[in-house]
Every structure is written in structure tokens, then in C-alpha cells.
């Protein structure tokens, strides 16, 4: 998936990301998600965001 | 932008690759017993008792037609009148855990309560959540964690 250019974004905290995250994901905690922290992401890339679970 | 609604836990329960300090640790789904007694809320206690055994140590998970957990029969509930409807004597909304929850975290809940077992249910409401997947027994968790510690 990420090999096809998609970017997996883990929106959990830095601590939770360090403990465990989907292989290949980058960490942008939800509280820090803004124009500045996402400026490095390619605009035409498929961005897939996730958190812990659907509950 | 796509929202992966299932999240990290959905990924984990499907056995897909994870990275990080706790990646690879065992989860509730690895040890839960799937073949557990189950019954419906309208059934008579006597009939369920006959089928399951009905000793204080026995447990039966009460589910609706869709497999969603409603309650649990255990302990003194078995001593109620045989003609009682299960829904009138069951423990409502028993404690549950998720299949992707880490064993070392679940065992803390089991010890603190204390509980001998906990029902494992599926995630979320919109994705068919709350369905019975199995039961996790504290003895099994304690044994596996002790083995893991000895081997590390």
C-alpha cells in the first residue's frame, strides 16, 4: 500500500506510536494535525488516517 | 484522504504487520476460547442449565439473534427458578474486552476486579460491534504471561 505511494498517518500520541503502529505509518498526533505538520505530505498522494479503533 | 475507521486494532486482529516496542505481544484473540456456551434471552433457565451444566463455575453468554452480547449467566444466577427467563436472571452487560487488547493490559483488569474471565466482543457499533467472539480466562492469561516472562 505505502509502496504504491499511499501515506499511512497514525494520529495517536507520540508515546502510543512508539509502542506500536502499523508498519510504515508516520505519526502526526491529532492534537498537532494542522497545515504546518502536514506540509511535507504530497498533495496528490492517497492519505490514510487512522487511530486506535472504531469505538 | 481516507479514514481507516477500523484503526490500528482492526489491522492487528487481522494479523497484519505492526512496528514498535510492543509489536508482537500477545493479544486477547490469541488466547480466547471461542467455543463457549451461549443462550438466548428468552430461553428458560432450566433448559439452559440442563444444556450447560449450571454449576457455579459454569458460565453461559447471553446473545441476541445477531450474536450481540446482552448478558451472562454465572454464579448464583444458576440457582434461580427453572421457569425464569434468562433475561430476568442474567448479569446485564458483563465486562468485555476487545480482541486486539494486549494480554498484559487485560490481565490487570482481571486481577483488579477480580474476575476469572472476560467476554471478548467485536469492535464498534457501525461495524457489527458487540458480537461475541469468545471468552478469555484469567488462568490462561496468567499461565501464558508467566511462560513469556520465564522465556525472556
Image: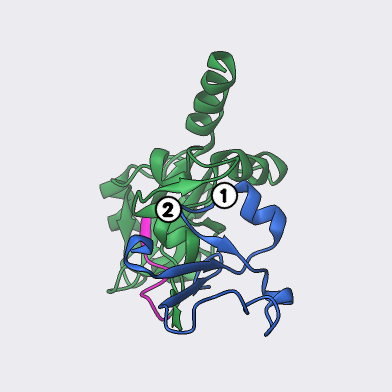
Chain colours: A blue, B green
Question: Tag 1, which secondary structure?
Answer: loop
- Please identify the residue farthest to the top as the structure is shown: B150
Residue B118 % position (x, y): 52, 49
In the picture shown, does residue B61 fall above or below B149?
A: below
Residue drawn at x 53%, y 51% is B101
Residue B83 % position (x, y): 36, 65
Does residue B132 show up magenta in the picture? yes
Of residue B42 and residue B106, the one placed in the foreground of this image is B106
Which chain is home to disc 2? Answer: B
Residue drawn at x 67%, y 85% is A35
Residue located beneath label 1 in the image: A20
| Residue B140 appears in the rendering | yes
In the picture shown, does residue B128 fall above or below B133?
A: below
Of residue B136 and residue A19, the one placed in the foreground of this image is A19
Examine the residues drawn in magenta and state their main secondary structure: loop
Residue drawn at x 60%, y 40% is B21
Residue located beneath label 2 in the image: B12
- Which range is magenta? B126-133
How far is mark 1 from mark 2, CA to CA? 10 Å
Residue B4 % position (x, y): 43, 74
Residue drawn at x 44%, y 53% is B99
Residue A15 % position (x, y): 71, 53
**Labels 1 & 2 near each other (Cβ < 8 A):** yes
Question: Tag 2, which secondary structure?
Answer: helix
Crowd tier of the residue under label 2, counting other residues whose Cα lies within 10 Å: few below 14, some 14–19, many 20 or above: many
In the picture shown, does residue B31 fall above or below B8?
A: above
| Residue B82 appears in the rendering | no
Amino acid at each position: 500500500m505505502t509502496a504504491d505511494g499511499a501515506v499511512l498517518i497514525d494520529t495517536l500520541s507520540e508515546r502510543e506510536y512508539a509502542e506500536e503502529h502499523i508498519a510504515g505509518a508516520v505519526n502526526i498526533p491529532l492534537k498537532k494535525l494542522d497545515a504546518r505538520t502536514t506540509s511535507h505530505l504530497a498533495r496528490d498522494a492517497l492519505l490514510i488516517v487512522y487511530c486506535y479503533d472504531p469505538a | 484522504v481516507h479514514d481507516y475507521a477500523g484503526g490500528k486494532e482492526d489491522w492487528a486482529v487481522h494479523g497484519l504487520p505492526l512496528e514498535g516496542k510492543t509489536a508482537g505481544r500477545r493479544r486477547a484473540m490469541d488466547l480466547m476460547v471461542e467455543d463457549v456456551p451461549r443462550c438466548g434471552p428468552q430461553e428458560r433457565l432450566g433448559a439452559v442449565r440442563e444444556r450447560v451444566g449450571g454449576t457455579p463455575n459454569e458460565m453461559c453468554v447471553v446473545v441476541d439473534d445477531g450474536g450481540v452480547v446482552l448478558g451472562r449467566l454465572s454464579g448464583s444466577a444458576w440457582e434461580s427458578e427453572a421457569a425464569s427467563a434468562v433475561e430476568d436472571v442474567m448479569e446485564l452487560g458483563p465486562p468485555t474486552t476487545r480482541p486486539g487488547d494486549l494480554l498484559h493490559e487485560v490481565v490487570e483488569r482481571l486481577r483488579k476486579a477480580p474476575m476469572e474471565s472476560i467476554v471478548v466482543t467485536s469492535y464498534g457499533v457501525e461495524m457489527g460491534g458487540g458480537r461475541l467472539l469468545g471468552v478469555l480466562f484469567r488462568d490462561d492469561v496468567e499461565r501464558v504471561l508467566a511462560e513469556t516472562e520465564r522465556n525472556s
